[in-house]
Amino acid sequence: MRDCLRILGIDPGLNRTGYGVIDCDGARLRIVAAGVIRVPAGDLPQRLKSILAGIGRVIADTQPQRAAVEKVFVNVNPQSTLLLGQARGAAICAAVAAGLEVREHTALQVKQAVVGYGKAGKLQVQSMVQRLLALSALPAADAADALACAICDAHATSHHAGQLLAGTSTRARRSRDAWRALGDRLAIRDRRA
């Protein structure tokens, strides 16, 4: 792809950190790499070091131009929120140390960009990521979340996608409604399974 932007999406976690790298050329998206960094059990500093090193390796291997990370939401359990924030901090540090701009998106923004519905479930996100990137199989949940974050960032960058997300035209509203309807069908299928 010419003049494309390579974006690293990160879904941080203390047990598993998902990553997804995509190339964005206008409205065209192509997967470069995706996977999960499995963080070994141990004390917190070693786990954070593992996340830092793992994201550093992904950056070295794929050479993204920018990173996108989901903003932390305040969980019912403050301890879990604090631990997730530390894992997120390690991932952000890896990106910043590599000289990448880091952009943050809320879970609502990510789900709206990918599924068209801010309260979409995990299976809906996985299915839409699979469709948007023309993947042969459903991606693992953590990798799908990271890819979704990268897709959201690509959409936020694109002028046309910005109109889609803002819903400023009739065509954009129809497109958003079609995504939402597909998301609803996937949610119904998920509940039946």
Image: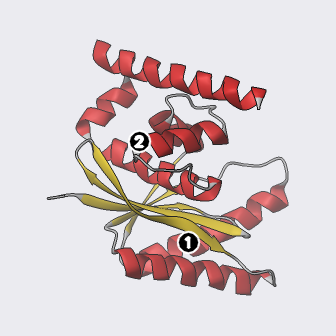
Report the disc number at residue 132: 2
Spatial CA distance of label 1 from label 2 is 25 Å
Q: How is the image coloured?
A: secondary structure
- For the N terminus, the image quarter is bottom left
Q: Of the two numbered discs 1 and 2 on the same chain, state the one appearing first in sequence.
A: 1
Whether residue 158 is visible here, answered yes or no, is: yes
Q: Position of residue 129 (x, y in %)?
A: 49, 44
Look at the picture and state if 89 lies above or below 135.
below
Residue that lies at the very extreme toward the front in this rendered image? 136
In this orientation, which residue lies closer to the viewer: 138 or 118?
138
Q: Residue at x 66, y 36 (%)?
A: 121
Look at the picture and state if 167 lies above or below 57.
above
Instruction: Count numbered badges in the picture.
Output: 2
Look at the picture and state if 187 lies above or below 17.
above
- For the C terminus, the image quarter is top right
The mark lying in front, picked from 1 and 2, is 2
**Secondary structure type for disc 2:** helix
Q: Residue at x 73, y 49 (%)?
A: 74
Q: Alpha-carbon neighbours of circle 1 within 10 Å: few (<14), some, or many (≥20)?
A: many
In this orientation, which residue lies closer to the viewer: 78 or 125?
125
Q: Position of residue 97 (x, y in %)?
A: 43, 81
Q: Residue beneath label 1, please?
A: 91
Whether residue 169 is visible here, answered yes or no, is: no
Q: Where is residue 118 in the image (x, y as percent from the top left)?
A: 58, 32
Report the disc number at residue 18: none
Badge 1 amino acid: Ala
Badge 2 amino acid: Leu
